Amino acid sequence: MEFEAVMGVGEPEIARPSPWVWVLRFPLPEPVGFGSIISWSFRRRYFYTADARPPDPDWIRINGNIRGFVVAADVTFECDLPPTIWEMRTHNDRVPGSFDTSVPLNSTDSKHVVLLETSDTRPDWGYGIAWAWDPSGSR
């Protein structure tokens, strides 16, 4: 797997606390004032051997950090969309699962999924988008 900063942040510091778990910290180019809005993006690419199965489920999660922290996330797939996509609001220690809410595909671009913005955040929770490639609903 490869991670690349695209806009608004420097190259990530990457930690691997366990197999298939990455913790990314993106440095900001300058200090940010309280109440400032920051938009940033990064690209995550997978490289598979011919017989490899993708991680299932998979997700992108942004930690809430403080109460009322506004979070908005979107994912663009450079391939066909997975059959199951859902919004996640979970404790930072949990793998996203059936306790999450399905995300409607609300974009005209069939490869773009948008998570509605939320400000109902908690410091110990993460917010984002999860997906499963197994059409039987592995979540």
Image: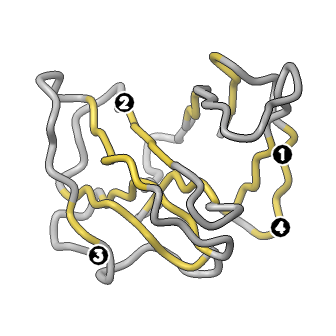
Q: Around disc 4, counting alpha carbons within 10 Å, would you say few (fewer than 14), some (14 to 19), or many (20 or more)?
A: few
Q: Amino acid at mark 4?
A: Pro
SS at mark 1? strand
Camera-near label (4 vs 2) is: 2
**Where does the image place residue 67, in percent across and percent down from the top left?**
62, 67
Q: Around disc 3, counting alpha carbons within 10 Å, would you say few (fewer than 14), some (14 to 19), or many (20 or more)?
A: few
Instruction: Please name the residue that numbered disc 4 is placed on.
Output: 17
Q: Which mark is residue 76?
A: 2
From this view, report whether residue 6 is shown above or below residue 27: above
Q: Around disc 2, counting alpha carbons within 10 Å, would you say few (fewer than 14), some (14 to 19), or many (20 or more)?
A: few
**Where does the image place residue 65, in percent across and percent down from the top left?**
71, 61
**Where does the image place residue 8, in percent across and percent down from the top left?**
69, 19
- Earlier-in-chain disc, 2 versus 3: 2
Instruction: Please name the residue that numbered disc 1 is placed on.
Output: 14
Depth check: 112 or 22 in front?
112
Q: Amino acid at mark 3?
A: Ser
- Earlier-in-chain disc, 3 versus 4: 4
Residue drawn where x is 20% and y is 64% of the image: 102
Q: Which mark is residue 138?
A: 3
SS at mark 2? strand
From this view, report whether residue 136 is shown above or below residue 115: below
Q: Around disc 1, counting alpha carbons within 10 Å, would you say few (fewer than 14), some (14 to 19), or many (20 or more)?
A: few
- Earlier-in-chain disc, 2 versus 1: 1
SS at mark 3? loop
Cα distance in 3D space between marks 2 and 1: 21 Å
Q: Are marks 2 and 3 in contact (CB under 8 Å)?
A: no
Q: Are marks 1 and 3 in contact (CB under 8 Å)?
A: no
